[in-house]
Image (tube, rainbow, N blue to C red):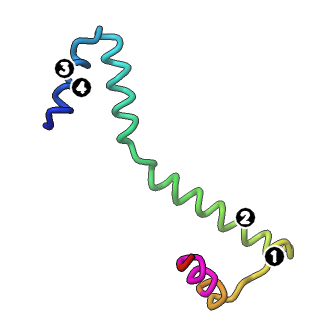
């Protein structure tokens, strides 16, 4: 551990148990990554929404070459 981590740990351990529990929960929450299944489901919903918009004429298709050219221009800016 670094000196900074040691210092923070010493301060945290001096807190009352209730506050240590709150701190521990917040630290653990900061480490939890979103569930991959949730991410996949969100992307599937977005793909379905876009497909429906395309089929209803609310969204047009853009050729891959045009998309790549646009991205290339943005990257240079």
Q: CA distance from mark 4 to mark 3?
A: 5 Å
**Which SS type dominates the magenta stretch?**
helix
Question: Going from the N terminus, do you reach mark 1 or mark 2 first?
Answer: 2
Q: Nearer the viewer, mark 4 or mark 2?
A: 4
- Residue marked by disc 2: 49
Q: Earlier in the sequence, mark 3 or mark 2?
A: 3
Q: In the picture provided, is 38 more to the left or to the right than 9?
A: right
* Crowding near the residue tagged with mark 3, few <14, some 14–19, many ≥20 C-alpha atoms within 10 Å: few
Q: Considering depth in this image, is 17 or 43 the residue closer to the camera?
A: 17
Marks 1 and 3: which is nearer the front?
3
Mark number for residue 45? none
Q: Residues within 10 Å of mark 4 (few under 14, many from 20)?
A: few
Determine the CA span between mark 4 and mark 2.
47 Å
Which is more toward the observer, 16 or 1? 1
The outermost residue toward the right is 57
Q: Which residue is mark 4?
A: 8
| Side of 71 where 51 appears, left or right | right
Residues at circles 1 and 3 in contact by the CB criterion of under 8 Å: no
Q: Residue furthest top?
A: 16
Q: Residue 55's mark?
A: 1
Name the residue: 19% across, 25% down.
7
Query: According to the image, label 3 marks what residue?
Result: 10
Location of residue 53 with respect to 38 vertically, above or below: below
**Range of the magenta residues?**
69-75
- In the rendered image, residue 44, in percent from the top left (x then y), is placed at 60, 63
> Contact, CB < 8 Å: mark 4 with mark 2?
no
Q: Earlier in the sequence, mark 4 or mark 2?
A: 4
Is 70 within the magenta?
A: yes
Q: Residue at 23% of width from left, 26% of height from top?
A: 8
Q: Secondary structure at mark 4?
A: helix
Specify the farthest residue to the bottom: 65
């Amino acid at each position: 551990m670094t000196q900074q981590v040691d210092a923070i740990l010493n301060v945290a351990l001096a807190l009352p148990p209730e506050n240590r529990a709150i701190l521990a929960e917040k630290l653990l929450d900061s480490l939890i990554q979103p569930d991959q299944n949730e991410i996949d489901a969100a992307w599937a919903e977005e793909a379905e929404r876009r497909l429906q918009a395309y089929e209803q004429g609310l969204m047009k298709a853009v050729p891959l070459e045009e998309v790549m050219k646009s991205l290339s221009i943005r990257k240079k800016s």
